[in-house]
Image (cartoon, rainbow, N blue to C red):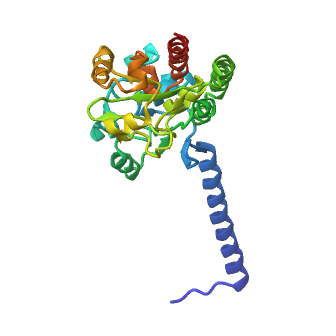
Amino acid sequence: MLLAFPSSSFTIAASMLTALAAGADLAAAVSNKATHITVSDDTGQRVAVLNPPLRIVSLAPGATEMLFVAGAGAHVVATVQYSDQPSAAQRVPRIGDVTGVDIERLVALHPDVAVVWPGGGNPAQIEEIARLGVPVYRQQVNALADLPDSLRRLGALAGTGAAAEQAARALEAHLARLSREYRSDRQPSVLLEVWNRPIYTVGGKHPMSDALRLCGARNVFADLRDLGPVVDIEAVIARNPDIIIAVAPPGEGAAWLAEWKRFGSLSAVRGGRLIAFEDQAFVRLGPSVIDAAEALCRRIAQITRN
C-alpha cells in the first residue's frame, strides 16, 4: 500500500533536508579552512598543508639550514646527508641524500610536507612523493638576494613567521653591507671550478655566480644557461679568466689547482691567482652561504691587490 503525504508536508521535509545538506557542506568547508593553510613556495606554486605545527621532511641540506634559521627546526623529523648546519640539524635522522631517499622510511614518518630543492637531486622521486599524497614545497633561490624572502615563505609554511622575519632582516643587512664594501668597477673574470674531472662550473643563473657579482667580480661563464655546465680546457683557455677558484671538497682544493699549472698561457696561472675555497656553506646554499661569500670576497680582494 502506497502512503500519500500532503504536498505541503513533503515540501517542508524536502526544504529541511536541503538546509541540513547545505549546512553540512558549509560546516565541512569551514572545518577544512580551519585545519588547512595554503602558501606559495619559492617557485610560485600553491601548497596546501595542515595548520602548523607540521611534521616536515627536508630533502636538501640548504633547505634544512633554512628551516632551522626560520625557526622551524624543531618540526623537521627527517633530512638527508650533509645537512650539518646549524649544529642542531646533525641530530635529525637521515633518510637518504640529495640523489635519493628511502621512500618507505619517509612514508612511515607521516610527514605533513616535504621541503625539496627543485634545482637538483632527483626530480622523479620528488614527483613520486607528491603522488603518494605528501604535499611538496619547493625551496629554491637563484640569487643571494632571494634568501630573505625564501626564509619568510618558510616561516609562513611552518607558522614561525616572527623568527623568520628577524632572520630575513639580518640577512638583508648583511647583504647590503657586503654590496657596499666590495663594489668594484674592475670586475675581474673568474672561473668557479665546482668539480675537476670533468670540469664543472656554474652558469649565470646560479647563486654562486651571483656571489661573484657581490664580490665585485664576474663569472667568466655567466652567459651559459645551465646551472652546472661541463666545460673543457679549450673553453677555459679561450675565455682566459683572471682568477681560478677551486670550490672543492675539504682537502682537495690544492690538488685541483695543481692541475691548472701546466696551462701557463692562462692569465690566472701566470699571475698566481689561484684560490682553493673549501667552505661547504658555499655549496649548501643556506643562509650561511652569505658568510661564505664574504670570506670569498676577502680572498678575491686580497689576490687582486697583490
Horizontal and vertical percent position of residue 208:
49, 30
In this rendering, would 281 be left or right of 234?
right
| Residue 130 visible in the current orientation | yes
In the image, is 163 to the left or to the right of 228?
right
Name the one closer to the observer, 24 or 91: 91
Seen at 32% across and 35% down, the residue is 233
| Pick the front one: 288 or 272 | 272
Q: Return the residue nearer the eye: 277 or 67.
A: 277
On screen, residue 246 above or below 225: above
Quarter of the rendering containing residue 81:
top left
Q: Position of residue 155 (x, y in %)?
A: 60, 31
Looking at the image, residue 158 sits to the left or right of residue 121; the answer is right
The residue lying furthest to the front in this view is 265
In the rendered image, the vertical position of residue 263 relative to residue 153, given as above or below: above
Could you tell me how many numbered marks the image carries?
Answer: 0
Q: Residue at x 38, y 20 (%)?
A: 269
Q: Residue furthest bottom?
A: 1
Q: Is residue 84 visible?
A: no
> Residue 300, image x and y in percent?
52, 17
Rendered position, 103 above or below 295: below
Q: Give the quarter of the image for residue 116.
A: top left
Query: Which quadrant would residue 76 be assigned to in this image?
Result: top left
Above or below — where is 212 with respect to 41? above
Q: Give the residue displayed 70% in from the left and 85% down from the top.
A: 7
Q: Position of residue 186 (x, y in %)?
A: 61, 24
- Looking at the image, residue 22 sits to the left or right of residue 107; the answer is right
